[in-house]
Image (cartoon, rainbow, N blue to C red):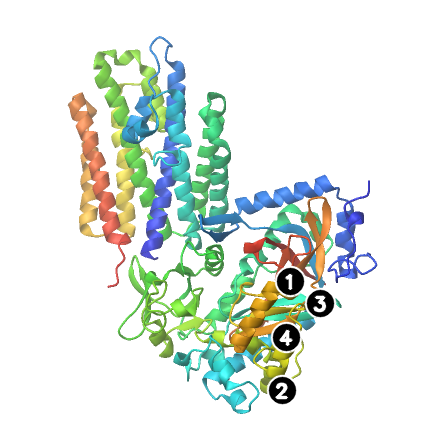
Amino acid sequence: MLSRVAERLYWMARYLERAEDTARLVRAYSHLMFDIPRSVGADWSVLVEILDAEDAFQQRYKNPTERNTVKFLLVDGDSPSSISHSIAWARENVRTTRDVLPGPTWELMNELGLLVEDRAMYAVKREHRFEFLESLIAKIQQLNGLIASTVLRDHSLWFLQLGQMIERADMTSRVIDVGDAVIIERGREQLTEIPTLWANLLTSLSATSAYRRKIGPTLEANQVFDFILSDAQFPRSMLYCFNQIEEMVGHLRGPAGLMRLTRASATKLVRFEAEEFDLPQLHQFILDLQEDIAEINDAIVDTWFVARSD
Amino acid sequence: MKNLWDRYAVTDFYDELTTATGSPRRAARKLVSRLRRFSLPEIRARQAAAELSIREMGISFTVYSQAGNIDRAWPFDIIPRVIPAKEWEKVSAGLSQRMRALNAFIHDVYNEKGILEAGIVPEALVVKSGGYRPECEGMEPAHDTWAHICGTDLVRDADGTFYVLEDNLRIPSGVSYMVENRQITKRVLPELFLDYSIHPVDDYPTMLYSTLESISPNRSGRPCVVVLTPGIYNSAYFEHAFLAQGMGAELVEGPDLYVDEKDRVFMRTVDGPRQVDVIYRRVDELFLDPEVFRKDSVLGVPGLMRAWRNGNVAIANAPGSGVADNKAIYAYVPDMVRFYLDEEPLIDNVHTYLCSRKEEREYVLDHLSELVVKPTNESGGYGLMVGPKATPAEHRKFARLIRKDPNNYIAQPTLALSTAPTLCEDGLGARHLDLRPFVLQGAGNWVTPGGLTRVALKEGSLVVNSSQGGGSKDTWVVD
């Protein structure tokens, strides 16, 4: 496979995963906000913070109102955090890698592009929002299903999965950090008063059913952290993502340095116990993981995407 | 209110679906009886469904403009064009014959030069054709074949006879749209397929692959075939990706390839270099190799010509093929058929006046208002003058151009291009069209059943190019 094609596949998977995760996040957060008593006042700025997009947001909008925030995340084509931006770039990457993807991928990708083009703007309003987000998530899953069931088990799939897992690890770390930030703000003792926060956090990661089956229906902060960060079986946990990245790097016969990097992050997570951390430490732990992800990404770029003529 | 079909007005031109009296042609009868059942809103709904399919299938072409490149949905008219298989057989045989003669000519020009020595084609014309490449002298590509893919433009005149208007031997495009048009018709007018056995067109990528495989210098195992594109912003990128996917071949850009010190071509893959055997190039030959042709080219591969000359890689179409793709050389194709194949041409040229010949030039200068004048070395409808539609000032301008550089111009009579019913604002209207079949030649020789029909969507217009308001139609060859 050409380096250029590998790079586009990697980014296509990242953008698709980012669009899906952002959709889940907006959906879960909208649900959460609808539950919050009017007296408390809804704070939509958290969504922008999760995506580290405060500067970009402030350049365009004055107030983090629901309308502004959701518009920013759904349809603002200039903002790299928006779903429409992610889908446009995913489509551009499919357009330029059609030769290695199954035929229907291109058509599904176009349907996805048309969905966003035609309907994302209406989803800024509450009454159309969920319908749009559900369709979007369903279409992306259809695309992922197509890829999972028809792509050759070769470089095509490995680079796609590498991109998907890097992006998922990154998004998961961002979502879990919000829980952390809210607790720091309100104090750990207040925690029992906002179980909806945890419920929605799990929902936004599609982790609710898995958590119930494995831990039970009671939501407890440390257990949620443990589950989302270091459960080896849940396919959206940080540990699972790092294990997958390691496996893909193995398939691709990646260099030893990159293997070590991935292994080190995974080991860190295997040993992780939320109980042993105070909140600032927990926040730092997550920041470190995000740095690991950035470092792994750079190593991937250096290893495979920089054109070599040796 | 009359149905859609009964309001279709007969014109003076040859119509693809109706006779001069307005009754459907034999091969079109079942199609017409289906169309009779449609009201205008019903057929419009099908057209809208086709347009949605085109957006979903992502069938687009790029238009270059000052405001930047715009990706436009492919313009498609849902009323198919029908050609009886018996008639097509003759056309197909003619195209195949012509392709063999053209390849014999190119090979001859770069080797024996028999046709030049026999004085049948003037040597000066060949050397100055703009497509002649001295770098190709003495080359003997596999099967003595240079042009492996040809898009031949055909038109019908008033009496319904097919004529060849142009042989596109450089990098002809449009074949992906031929295949996609059929896909769209199947989706939006599936009931039409109940009545007919239509020759399928979707095996084109397979036939192209077999052609390319047959010219591979590597005879052991599956050859490494790549499609070389100028890049993702090229107007035909959609087609390049379509063909690469259809052949299971890699789609590469110039910088993905390099030539090593043993003159072999490699592509840069994530597992290191992989040797390339056959390049289907969609890059103009002048940009192919900066060592030999344009030094400023970033689309090509330095050393590619060395690799090709040493027989380490096959290139389709071979560099130098353009020597036969020239409107002055075109006039001699019937002579080539006689000279190389000792056969009479099965399909005719449009009558062509060569401005390089004094008598013919005088005739052209006297009849500018009746003729179409074309520069010999341009394609895509650029730089030509349609006499009857041009102003006296344009006539004077072309008279000057012809006198200044007679070798660079030819003229042809204005053809009464055939028409076919096409969905317009207020129903079906007669619109002019042409046809581009594709001919492949490697170890064997193959012609697409039908081809890409391009239709001028504006009433009375003869311009079918999609960049200038042209559309397309599904083309059926039926038993």
Q: Evaluate if marks 4 and 3 touch, with contact meaning CB atoms under 8 Å apart.
A: no
Q: Nearer the viewer, mark 3 or mark 2?
A: 3
Using residue B398 as the reference point, say whether residue B294 is left or right of it.
Answer: left
C-alpha gap between disc 4 and disc 3: 20 Å
C-alpha gap between disc 4 and disc 1: 25 Å
Q: Which residue is mark 2?
A: B342
Residues A161 and B33: in front is B33
Q: Classify B383 as above or below B352.
A: above
Q: Which residue is mark 4?
A: B364
**Three-letter code, disc 3:** Asp
Q: Which residue is mark 3?
A: B157
Mark closest to the chain's N terminus, 4 or 3: 3
**Three-letter code, disc 2:** Asp
Quadrant the N terminus of chain A occupies: bottom left
**Three-letter code, disc 1:** Asp
Please, which residue is most extreme toward the top here?
Answer: A39
Q: Evaluate if marks 2 and 1 touch, with contact meaning CB atoms under 8 Å apart.
A: no
Q: Is residue B440 visible?
A: no
Mark closest to the chain's N terminus, 3 or 2: 3
